[in-house]
Amino acid sequence: MTNRVNPPHAAVTDLRCEYAAAPLGMGERVPRFSWRLDDPRRGACQTAMQIRVTDRPDTLAEGDAAGEPWRWDSGRVATDQSVLVPYAGPPLTSRQRCGWQVRVWDQHGQPTAWSAPAFFEMGLLEAHDWQARWIGIARPGDRSELKPAPYMRKGFTLSGVVHRARLYASAKGVMELRLNDQRVGEDLLTPGWTEYATRFQYRAYDVTAMLRTGENVLGAIVGDGWYSGWTAQGPRVYGEDPMLAAQLEIELEDGRRLIVATDGSWKATTGPIVHSDLFQGEFYDARLELPGWDGPGYDDAAWRTVDLVEDLDPAKMTAAPGPAVRAIMRLKPITVRQASEGAWLFDMGQNMVGHVRVTVAGERGSTLTIRHGEMLNPDGSLHVANLRRARATDTYVLRGEVARDRNEVWEPRFTFHGFRYVEITGWPYGSRPSADAVQGVVVHSDMAVTGEFACSNKLVNQLQHNIQWGQRGNFVDIPTDCPQRDERLGWTGDAQVFIGTACFNMDVQGFFAKWLTDLTDAQLEDGWFPNFAPRAVASGGNAPAWDDAGVICPWTVYQAYADRRILERCYESMKRYLDCLERHSDNLVRPFVPYYGDWLSIDATTPHDLIATAYFAHSVRIVADAAAALGRDEEAGRYQDLFARIRQAFQRAFVTAGGRVSGESQTAYVLALHFDLLPEDKRGFAADRLEQDIDSLEHKGHLSTGFVGVRDLNPALTAAGRLARAYRLLKNTTYPSWLYAVVHGATTIWERWDGWTAHGGIHDPGMNSFNHYAYGAIGQWLYESVAGLRTDPARPGYKHVLIAPRPDPTNDDPITWARAVYRGVHGRIETHWRVADGSFDLDVTIPANATATVWLPHDDPSACTEMGRPLDKTEGVSAVRAEGASVACEIAAGRYAFGCPWSRPRT
Ligand code: BGC
């Protein structure tokens, strides 16, 4: 082996420790390292790697690694693993900051250069690390009243130069941290919503540059958030008043250390945030501002000392594993018009989630009332009936003490709304606001966009856009059903249906690592998973296809990211759930339960016991696969056997000798087919019945599936050889269909197929969200079947990719090309196919250190080419073979351009 020549163009990049590039406050005692090999050569892969970790990150940053006493040097390890490689050095301790870098050896045994260094820093790992106490103020008034947000501050003096400072903070509620007149970090609605009885998240911030020798002030504003504000279960479900726990740890250059922690000595008051609430909105009176309160030199004599002081239970403090919520982008309104006397209506052009930022000038005390809505009523006014008890109204009272034309800029801190339209009344001087007076600030968990899907059908592209915006709007710390009405819960059914799509669109690994903790925290004693998580005070279990999220979600995350630890951590709770299902079954058939059936299906009923039994089987099969993936072979065998027995029980209870499935609904057939519950010789018949139902007089070529059937409908049709039918359902624009909403102007996915219809207008506002992602679960089929890109379940994290595009075989306005890009943990994968003039072309990119199997839609290997050459003469292509109606081959990493003859089948 030579260490002299680095392979040209090969580099190790994109270093991550757990789920972030440079995490602070790492809570994992054994963090894992991931990187990407950037190497465009065909067949590029990693054959060995070496990681080294130092306690002296500054030396590493300065590029002076020579003579470094490494904390951990893995040495050269022969492995192709580049994702989530566990640290294996001496135990890491609280606050420890490390630098690390990695190099790899390629397929020729050539090492790359060492990567640029990356960093991670441990959080507070031991109970004795916590000195902070919970502090707040008792606010008078009754339970249902909206109350002001406490402002809290603590001054302190530093008699030396600061070397390093970290702020660790959490809230019962949501917080904005301030230090010396500035905001700390960019996080919003932190630390988010967890099962507060069990867990509070904390975050760590590097505040070194914000401190100075002399006087300093640490402050915080704390909003009610999910803790003491409104949630679906009413106001103040967890506690009466929001509280803060923070500790600022400072190391001076002379080696002295000090900690400024929340305790009974802090001063507090209330100020301009007259109230703030996630559902009801924020009321901000700028006349009550406290200029300079968060910096030195402010006179806080009129403030009181905090009157709520509680001990903090270190066992409940958890480092936040996932991304924080942040302002991700700003939208400009596309129109402004007068809706009625004094009311201005802004159309943001996009159903979005977040808040507005207003720029306004006016007299002191002028009051803007800002209402939000997703739709307009037929008379053009704002539709708010579907928000139910959520008032979604922000109020801004102008400071107005300066010149008449001096702008004030305001945006709320502790609320969010789901809206496309904004109505503002009270604009000063009766004037017309300009379009740039309002911006829509889009707020969600900060996840990288990883997926793109596009094709020749513009309406389908708008559908993909709507799916992505549904994800933006509902991935606000937890995956919610909807972001606008008085609900916004982490409904488990919605999450399990959509998670496959979500994993394509954005990097949701850390996001789900966090929510799966919420979900397992919320598991009920007897083994049920809750209907939603966090579950707060209520929500039982036993909702088939909802509870199963506890099995499906960890498995899906494992598949997408090869995150074995998540699977391991969820595994015991998955098993407990299965035991519970088995106990509550009658000879392995699950009984009828009132919840929720094929929720919001349209003109169809699927028996609840059938859904429950089908999902029981499906969950058991997943746990069998999970057991096998975790090397628990005996359990895998046991669950495989259980699956076979449930399958038989399902057939006895719900399938006739001829192959009809009880209920005969689309969803009944979809589940039976997709979960492999039918005898082999009945599958064709079941697929016929499914198609006949779609074609029936009642459905006339339309779907009827609700939440439970929607994701698997097109995959089931595709697997059963009914691809044309799946494409027709996709392209259908008449009611009910995915594109019906699209042709009627939707910019997000609607909760119901009939949310708005040409014949009935806006459906029952008692339950009608226009931003509910469940029906967006078709997205997974767009990526996996239309574009043809999925991970090999046996080599998760797209270590081995299955590329099987399924071109549109229909004659009615066929889709002629499709393209998907997915930036996975091994790198960028792309598929792009086109059909024209009897030919099929497919460009494929597979990242270094991954491989793929490709299927081309032609049955003769000799007619298939890559860059015009026969497949078996092509570097990087091997095992070319005919497989049924396709040609299959194995490919190494690299870029390929395949071609084969193709003619549209007569359908
Ligand atoms: C929510 C759903 C949820 C359902 C349970 C609704 O109120 O919005 O999306 O899954 O209840 O049936």
Image (cartoon, rainbow, N blue to C red):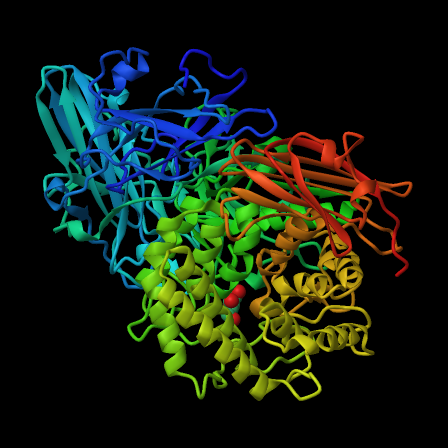
User: Is residue 747 visible in this depiction of the protein?
Assistant: no
Residue visible at 49% across and 24% down? 406
Relative placement, left or right, of 896 versus 285 is right
* Residue 392: x %, y % from top left: 49, 53
* Residue 652: x %, y % from top left: 57, 88
Relative placement, left or right, of 901 versus 866 is right
User: Is residue 447 visible in this depiction of the protein?
Assistant: yes
Q: Nearer the viewer, residue 542 or 420?
A: 542
From this view, report whether residue 22 is shown above or below residue 424: above
Q: Nearer the viewer, residue 898 or 219?
A: 898
Q: Quadrant of the C terminus?
A: bottom right
Residue visible at 12% across and 22% down? 157
* Residue 847: x %, y % from top left: 57, 33
Residue visible at 55% across and 50% down? 792
From this view, report whether residue 590 is shown above or below residue 798: below
Q: Residue 2's quadrant in the figure?
A: top left
* Residue 728: x %, y % from top left: 80, 60
Q: Quadrant of the N terminus?
A: top left
In this rendering, the count of numbered labels is: 0
Q: Nearer the viewer, residue 747 or 314?
A: 314
